Amino acid sequence: MSPISFSVSRFAMGGIAMFLVMYLQYRTECNNTPGKVAFLPKIKRDHWPRLLFVSVIGATLAPWLGIEGLGLTHGARASLWLALGPAISTGIGYLFRTEKMGNFGYIGVLLAVIGTVILAWDGLRPEQGYWLGDLILIIALALTVIELHAIKPLAREYGSVSIVALRTAIGGSLYILIATPDLIEVTWMSLGLWTWIAILAGGAIGVGVGQWVKVRALKILGPTQVVLYGNMVPIAALVIAWLSIGENPSLMEIISAIFIITGAIFIQVIDNEAGTTSTTPTQKEEDLTFFTETKQEN
């Protein structure tokens, strides 16, 4: 399969699974709540431009560029680039004065920058040749971070789960339309068992049910614990790629992973525990929810 065919198939399965989970939750609320319960909120007219904007960049362009970049590099390396999200988001928040950083936050950003330089230098080596894939992944990550900041007002107005569902439906429909020529060329009956498992299980569980689980986890575990689990993704990707398909990470990739992940922990956990951010606990949970969800889709 072409990268975009696999990505959009997985994305579609995730969208179906997410709406199925939402419907089951909706039926439960209807049975337990007197009166009429809306399945999806009614979006105000002046909010539609913002919703369309975040849908296109977050559910169309970001996953599209993410899978194309992945096709030019390998999964473990891609997960390292995505682990830079907290540092980039914090930097943007600091520049636009939407967030504040303490000393530990500055240390975390510095560590992430060092890891980025090491990883980029490793990709530029002739025997590696990952520079183009790295560049595309960075652009996809930048779109993800922009969506994170743009979607916050909608989440506060309509709720995080509902707005993510609408954004996924709108952006996903456009994504399927773009991928239609590639989807037509796929010989679906000749795909192997593991390909179908990757599409169905990877999409339904990873993209669909996984998003709902993260939202629930934030309410049960709290942001710090969920962040720590999220920062294990690059490590897990390196180990699984090594065990399953024999991708041996280079020494520079391992060193950059240590810097980037440590930087993320400094920014997301230690600096937040020191009480230096200006956001309320609810806002922190929304930020974390959207970042982990969009990161998972890439």
Image (tube, rainbow, N blue to C red):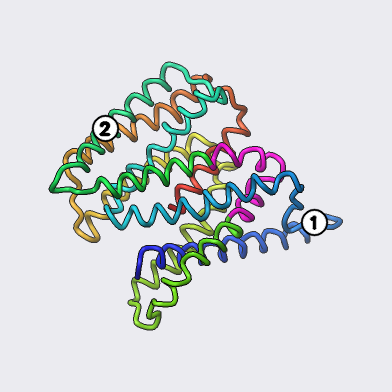
Residue at the image position 52 percent from the left and 49 percent from the top: 58
Describe the element under mark 1 as helix, strand or loop: loop
Tell which residue pokes out farthest to the bottom in this image: 189
Q: Main secondary structure of the magenta part?
A: helix
Instruction: Provide residue 130's location: percent of width, then percent of height.
Output: 24, 48
Q: Nearer the viewer, mark 1 or mark 2?
A: 2
Q: Mark 1 touching mark 2, by CB under 8 A?
A: no
Instruction: Identify whether 175 is placed above or below 214.
Output: below
- Residue 247 numbered tag: none
Q: Residues within 10 Å of mark 1 (few under 14, many from 20)?
A: few
Q: Position of residue 121 (x, y in %)?
A: 21, 36
Magenta segment, which residues? 147-167
Q: Amino acid at mark 2?
A: Val
Kindly give the residue lying farthest to the left in the view shown: 127
Most extreme residue toward the right, as rendered?
A: 35
Q: Which residue is mark 2?
A: 117
Image coordinates of residue 59 in percent, x first then y, are 52, 54
- Of 169 and 241, nearer the camera is 169
